[in-house]
Amino acid sequence: MPVGDRQQLHPMSRAALASPYLNAHDRSVVRGMRRGAPPRGLPSLMRWYIAQWDYEVPDRLHVRGTWHDAEAASALGAPQDCPTWTAYLYGSDMALDKDGYYCLPLHAALCEMTRSAGVGAWEATYLLQLAFGSFDWQAVGARFGMDVEPAEIVTTAALVRLWEVWTPQPMIVR
């Protein structure tokens, strides 16, 4: 479910009754992000991170047809890979489209963090583990040997740094 879209909740559900202003809050967060204001607090940062990650990961693995390659073909009828999935899997995180935008801006920011000196590379590893671990920051923190409070602080700091590195604007290629 993208950020700012809680229309799937039934109007009389417990979540809708407990938080009647949830839709307005999500719209406010989206407006702030469009202005360039960073999300505040771990819940807002997590919503932003999940939405960006979901936007970049292709949702289709296969397309109609059988697999064919330059050297071989599938004798058993294996399904053909989707071109967007193949580009996601084998392409560069820093790839640019024809307009100069990153094809995967969040992945490019994580790649840039791994290249930085200091804790940036560790934070990028932590954030990748967070994405691969179903965005459960408490479980990922426990895997890194942290209690809940330090895991919350580390997750918030890593997401703030990712927000600062992340850019949806075009790159200037020189």
Image (tube, rainbow, N blue to C red):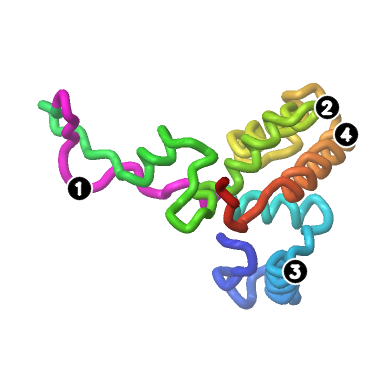
Q: Quadrant of residue 1?
A: bottom right
User: Residue 24 occupies which quadrant of the picture?
Assistant: bottom right
Q: Which residue is mark 2?
A: 146
Q: Which residue is mark 1?
A: 64
Q: For the view shown, which residue lies furthest in the front direction?
A: 174
Q: Secondary structure at mark 3?
A: helix
Percent coordinates x, y for residue 27 in the rendering:
69, 73
Marks 4,2: beta carbons within 8 A: yes
Q: Which residue is mark 4?
A: 150
Q: Quadrant of residue 125?
A: top right
* Element under disc 4: helix
* Image side of residue 128 versus residue 81, left or right: right
Q: CA distance from mark 1 to mark 3?
A: 41 Å
Is 37 left, or right, of 87 in this rendering? Answer: right
Amino acid at circle 3? Gly
Foreground disc of the pair 2, 3: 3
Mark 1 to mark 2 CA distance (whole Å) = 46 Å
Pointer 2 local density, CA inside 10 Å: few below 14, some 14–19, many at least 20:
some
Q: Which residues are magenta?
A: 54-72
Residue type of the residue flagged with mark 1: Arg
